[in-house]
Amino acid sequence: MTAAPFRICPTCREEYTSTTSRCAECDVELVAQADLPDEPEPPPFEFPPASELRCIRVAPLAWIRALSQALEEREVPHRVEPTQAAAAPEGQRPELFGNVDLFGLYVLEEDAPDVRVLDEVIAQQVLPGEAPDVEEGELEACPACGTELPHDATECTDCGLAFG
């Protein structure tokens, strides 16, 4: 003998025995599972266009790819688009790269401060001559979490961020 199928409330989705006809909480007629209407799927998240985002860096593709990969590992949504040197954020000098194609990396406003810190780490790897000199024995702070580290550290002992 097979068990009778259960019944479901179409409002709260609670399950009841097949002999129950109304939901105790919602006071609506129960339905068979096969008659249960599909739950509407939430609309997909649409990342805003670059014009509505904060530009973090304008640089050649290799730099942008390194930053993008680091953001993907951290599951930070971002957008990469070809751009013009005029679109560079304040303080950046895309003209350093000569006549190469430039790309911009854009993030949500609330992610910008953390992404700028990560970009500084990548900048030190890409343009080591621009990083400030550190004296022997002087401690530096991890740009991601602020942990003090020796100047020759290759990885943060707290958050695991690898340095170039």
Image (cartoon, rainbow, N blue to C red):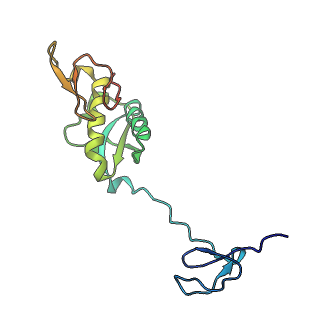
Please state the horizontal and vertical placement of residue 120, each as a whole percent of the image.
26, 32
Q: Nearer the viewer, residue 10 or 82?
A: 10
Q: Residue at x 39, y 57 (%)?
A: 48
Q: Position of residue 111 (x, y in %)?
A: 31, 48
Q: Is residue 114 above or below residue 28?
A: above
Q: Position of residue 164 (x, y in %)?
A: 34, 21
Quarter of the image containing the N terminus? bottom right
Q: In the displayed structure, would residue 8 be above or below residue 103?
A: below
**Residue 31, relative to residue 155: is it above or below?**
below
In the displayed structure, 128 sits above or below 35; it is: above
Furthest residue in direction right, as rendered:
1
Specify whether residue 72 is in view.
Answer: yes
The residue lying at 23 percent from left, 30 percent from top is 147
* In the foreground, 13 or 138: 13
> Quarter of the image holding residue 28?
bottom right
Whether residue 132 is visible here, answered yes or no, is no
125 vs 154, nearest the viewer: 154
Indicate the quadrant where residue 141 lies.
top left
Does residue 10 appear to the left or right of 110 in the view shown?
Answer: right
Q: Judge from the rendering whether residue 29 lies leftward or rightward of residue 107; answer left or right.
A: right
> With 149 as the anchor, is 43 left or right in this view?
right
Q: Position of residue 6 (x, y in %)?
A: 70, 74
Q: Residue furthest front?
A: 1
